[in-house]
Image (tube, coloured by chain):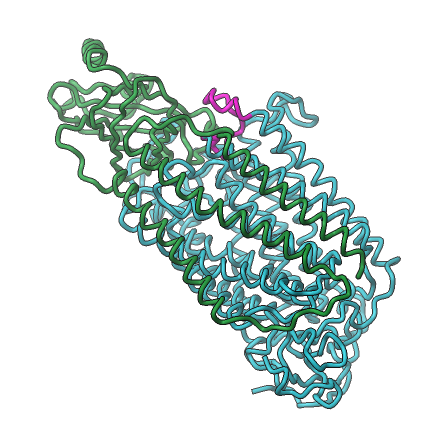
Amino acid sequence: MNPLPDHVHPAVASPSGFFRRYVFSTDHKVIGLQYYFLALAAVTIGIVLSLLMRVHLAWPQAHWPLVTGGTLRPEQYLALMTMHGTIMVFFVLTTAPLGAFGNYFLPIQIGAPDMAFPRINMLSFWFTLAAFLCMLAAFAVPGGAPISGWTAYPPLSGLGSVTGPGEGMGQTMWIVSIGIFCIASLLASINFITTTIEMRAPGMNLTRMPLTVWAWFVTAVMSLLSFGALLAALIMLVLDRSAGTSFFTPAGLVVNGELQSGYSGGWPLLWEHLFWFFGHPEVYIAILPGMGVTSHVISNFSRKPVFGYRAMAATLCAIGILGFLLWGHHMFVSGMNPYSSLAFSALTLSIGVPSAVKTFNWLGTMWGGKIQFDTPMLFSIGFVSFFVTGGLSGIFLAQPALDNLLHATYYVVAHFHLVMGVAAIFGIFSATYYWFPKMFGRMMDETLGKLHFWLTFVGAYCIFMPMHFMGIYGGIRRYADWTGATYLAALQPLHLFATIAALVTAAAQLIFFYNFVSSLTRGEKAAENPWRATTLEWSTASPPPVDNFAGAFPTVYRGPYEYSVPGAPQDFTPQHLPPELAGVSEGATHA
Amino acid sequence: MRGSAASALLLFIALTILVGLTIFLFATGFFAAPPPITPVGVRIDHQYNLTLYATGMAFVLAQLGLGWAVFRYRDRGQPARFTRGNAVLEIAWTIVTAVVFLGLGGLAARSWAQSRITKVPTDAIRVEVTEQQFVYNFRYPGPDGKFGRIDPELISAPTGNPLGIDPNDPAGLDDIVVSTLTVPVNHPIELLIRSQDVVHNFFVRELRLQQDAVPGMTVPLQFTPDRLGRYYIVCTQLCGMGHNQMHSFLDVVSDADYREFLTRAEAR
């Protein structure tokens, strides 16, 4: 099914004009970088928003410059929180792992010259950018940004400004932005899936695909199946808000003394079901690429094949399937039938099994290895640690009985930040340090990288570990301050500690930015294969030419993680080396 | 070898400190929840502790295993031990985790069933909880034991009818509406939780119970408190700008005090 000639292709010249080459480019590498820089901008804004929240939580009476009245009002806090969550989930954790790295490296790792649909790829990026700008504009409209959280539960989000500031125009902008984002993600996922299925180089069997490709592929399938549900829900929400429909709005609501007439028969839980049917797979959309990168990097820097390659690919698929069957664990206390909670609980605990198997296999890959601690490896080790910590608290939250105490507390905040926030970000950092030489042709500074790792690793634990205790104590999330329930005042020392940790950790990210920018021009020139790695992206120039392989498309002879193969002349055997050059026969290294 | 000794040692130390500190904080009951005030709450705490031991063990083994692996197998010039995996190990740890995780889920199902699925005793005291931005109202049926009809058109907080009780329905004439929840100790209680506007929540950490209040639905919630005292009721479902201010109190009182509360409330 491969549309490419088996061997040699004329080299493709890059488009000449600046705009065609760097702005309206159809080159998956340029688009990948565009996604990456979009995510960098988004994460910077997202971090600033979180710092504003953390500072307010630590010093609720602090006087702020530029804020009328001096102190931050609760609705302003909620607007910060809503925008922080939305920007981080959509424009960082969905955009960077799949949009940026998937775009840049999936085609190269399977030996393709580009994505299957380069123009659709370009369209996906521009839709994502439009969505991002639309989201930011919500800050500027009358009433300000929405206050209903990234989950936007109606009727709070469904009735307009009567339910609160930000619920008028701000919420509309939010809905439009996420709607555009859904379309971009649907287009992108079709592209990733088609590319993976149709464009693999000769010899690149499914069982020879790097685990990064497996992860992006499963992620794309999940995107395709989940963003449609969100898009449908958003359309219904818009209609409820503006066209007088009643998908989510029941009759007889009285808001702020005003009877909301004209509604009948709507059901708020319908939104919750549709939202979480998307929202839970979304968690895995954020984390699966990180799992792929971690597997890839740990193997590379342990100089060993991935332990249980087939189990690793199978567990990605298992997580992809189970990820769709457990959205109800967000709704244990929502008022849905309590019997269904038992089913969702069992299914949620089941997904712990493939997750645990992955952890065992990462340890198994390192076990008996020859571990090198370059910065990408440190971040992948950090990924495993955070994934374990954040994953295990999920075992509590998966039990509806314990959700009675822990739901909507800081325990949940700690859980999902560690597992889908910090772990996923560590995956992104690992990928950045690992592939920077390939993307930009220069190495990042190792000393700064290690400093960045250590401050971020310790800092992130200091931010989020205390939140487990806040939650067990009964500390409610999404509270601007504790004045409504005085028992929450006891948590103030923990808030202060987490805020200081957050400020230090955020400051440490400046080291990363400095390292990134200065390495672009002053970094040591990168060789073709600086990590002595095996996969196809390391068989071409750094950065790769427009068609990725300068016309000489690779043929694949073996699995992706052939490290330290007995009898081989060196401790890595690249996928593309013919047996006669590799020094080992094809059969001996077949995965 | 790229300076692997220092990184490996630091990782080992950092992960050991993480594990040690976590064990210490949990063992000393750092910011533990206050004791539960219902038999079901006690069972939920039991289940919590069981889960804490199981996941705690996994946490210690995984983090220390990670720390040990990176330290022990740091690059000291040794060759890597070539292996592609081990099917027996894969199957073993799949089965073990499945048994532990699903076993915990099975045990937890019992305390969930007790808190949500068991039949409400016929003598349970029924109180309707109506939530709105950003207050709680509690309605007792009064001496006739029946709640009067409610009409959203009649809702008018300024004129003293925040729930919209229909004055033409005789069942509603003796209904008691108050802003805090008073219940007698050791008596089964059934709350009927509603919302007038957006999704809210009813959470009392000492009850180990929380339940969303969903507009258009009436969701039951039962408990039998066995300890006198005043406890915070808070909203955990984001409901608007006053979300963090939305609270009320649960007063668990003696039978005599409860009768007195009803008498005084009926007199008003």
Apparent side of residue B214 relative to residue B236 in the rendered image (left or right): left
- Is residue A31 something one can see in this rendering? no
Q: Magenta stretch: dominant SS?
A: loop
The cyan one among the chains is: A
Where residue A414 appears, x then y in whole percent? Answer: 53, 41
In the foreground, B77 or A17? B77
Where residue A196 appears, x then y in whole percent? Answer: 57, 75
Q: Quadrant of the N terminus of chain B?
A: bottom right
Where residue A464 appears, x then y in whole percent? Answer: 58, 39
In the displayed structure, B68 sits above or below A220; it is above
Q: Residue at x 68, y 78 (%)?
A: A565
Residue A489 in the magenta stretch? The answer is yes
In the foreground, A429 or A256? A429
Residue B21 appears in which quarter of the rendering? top right
Residues rendered magenta in the picture: A474-491
In the displayed structure, A478 sits above or below A486; it is below
Chain B, hue in figure: green
Where residue A37 appears, x then y in whole percent? Answer: 71, 56
Residue A54 in the magenta stretch? The answer is no
Q: Quadrant of the C terminus of chain B?
A: top left
Residue B184 appears in which quarter of the rendering? top left
Q: Residue at x 54, y 38 (%)?
A: B23
Q: Residue at x 22, y 30 (%)?
A: B190
In the foreground, A590 or A20? A590
Label count reads 0
In the displayed structure, A144 sits above or below B144; it is below
- Is residue B193 something one can see in this rendering? yes
Residue A307 appears in which quarter of the rendering? bottom right
